[in-house]
Image (cartoon, rainbow, N blue to C red):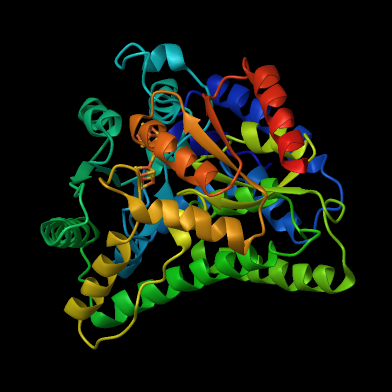
Amino acid sequence: MSDYKQMWSELGLDLNAHDVLLSVLSEAYQNIFLSQKMRPQGMKYFDFVMSEVHGLRIKELMDAKAEGRIVVGSYCVFVPEELILAVDGISVGLCAGAEFNFEGAEQVLPRNLCALIKSAFGFKFGRVCPYLEACDLVVGENTCDGKKKAYEVLSPMVKDLYIIDLPQMKTDTGKMLLKGEYLKFITKLEEISGKKITYESLKKGIDIVNAKRKAVKRLAELRKADPPPISGLDALLINQVFFYDDPVRFTNSVNALCDELEERIKKGEGVSPEGTVRVMISGCPMAVPNWKVPYIVETSGATIVGEESCVGERGTQWLTETKGTTVSELIDNIIDRYFKIDCAIFTPNPSRLEHIKEMFKKYNAKGVIHYNLQFCQPYIIESGLVESNLEGNGIPTLRLETDYSQEDTGQLKTRIEAFVERIKG
Ligand code: BJ8
């Protein structure tokens, strides 16, 4: 990696703590990703992105800011990237997936809060996240209680925190609320960027994000093959990079990888032997570098063929329609698209269960691993309903509850291996 120390220091990072984080990240990456056999060549691009995730990409953000573009960070797939692109902004994901400086986070937050939230605060207090520090605007959203209240604590610690209120029910009133909130968000984006959204700029934003979604959907389709041409770990990594990378370059790289995977499928090549137990993951999002459970699964005799998650198909399954000739019609298309997201904060939330079953069938999975982060009430409560329905329909289901620590690795491995044996019959 080039020497980015000056840039990091100008962003206010704690250089020593940041070095520690990068070295842990790099070691984990070596052990988890680079040790895999039969990886596609196209993954080299994503290895490069990860090796420069706090370097070159941050430099790109800083260069863009110098040219007058804004950087907007968010923690949820309810924040429309299309709108950010329409004011020539750059959207970055801020969710964190590492247990870093939880002691710092627990100074202001309760211990019994999900690791995703604590990690974001740990990164902020530890001054190790250049993405957060590069943001002109940080967008929070009223989803679960944990995030909603934590944003109040975060507010004085960042330059500009903007909150989007979200409905909790899929009703007409809920949709009107979402529309009102997105319209206010547009005003905010126009204000801080100094640029007005036009039909052309919004249409371009929609096209860019749709192309990105189409590329990951194409990748998902290719995972139907047996043997699978790509590991679940690598597919997850791509879904994680989705939130950081330049969207056009990302799309081209995923499509180039898919070309290669198509060739592999024609030749019958895969990352695991034909007939390897196929499972899908469903539940809480896995932010970088949260690779613990997928790593255990794929080193326990199974292969992951799909993710029903916001870092996965829940976040990418729908495109935004492009019909209409006015800004207002395009905005309505965006609202229609985002209102379909079936996050567990909605009540009731039947379409998520239907989507899990649809994915199970489509990817010819043999079991579902329901991934819960400890203390995540929406997904933990919903997982009971999901499990009983899936098991009732003959779909083997394993419910896991974990955090970002490595302490339960042995126990998780025992349970996952037993589940794989159960599926094998
Ligand atoms: S749309 S899943 S990205 S809210 S894990 S912080 S729910 S206590 S992340 Fe999410 Fe948007 Fe929904 Fe998706 Fe709370 Fe649960 Fe923690 Fe969570």
Residue 66 at least partly seen: no
Tell me the quarter of the picture where residue 105 sits.
Answer: top left
Q: Residue at the spot x=64%, y=31% of the render? A: 292
In front: 171, or 94? Answer: 171
- Residue 73 % position (x, y): 36, 47
Residue 320 falls left or right of residue 317: left
In front: 14, or 115? Answer: 115
Q: Residue at the spot x=69%, y=67% of the render? A: 222
Residue 173 falls left or right of residue 341: left
- Residue 390 % position (x, y): 51, 45
Quarter of the figure that contains the C terminus? top right
- Residue 338 % position (x, y): 31, 61
Residue 404 at least partly seen: yes
Can you say whether 36 is above or below 374 in the image?
A: below
Can you say whether 405 is above or below 425 in the image?
A: above
Quarter of the figure that contains the N terminus? top right
> Ligand 1 is in which quadrant of the figure?
top left
Tell me the quarter of the picture where residue 182 sits.
Answer: bottom left
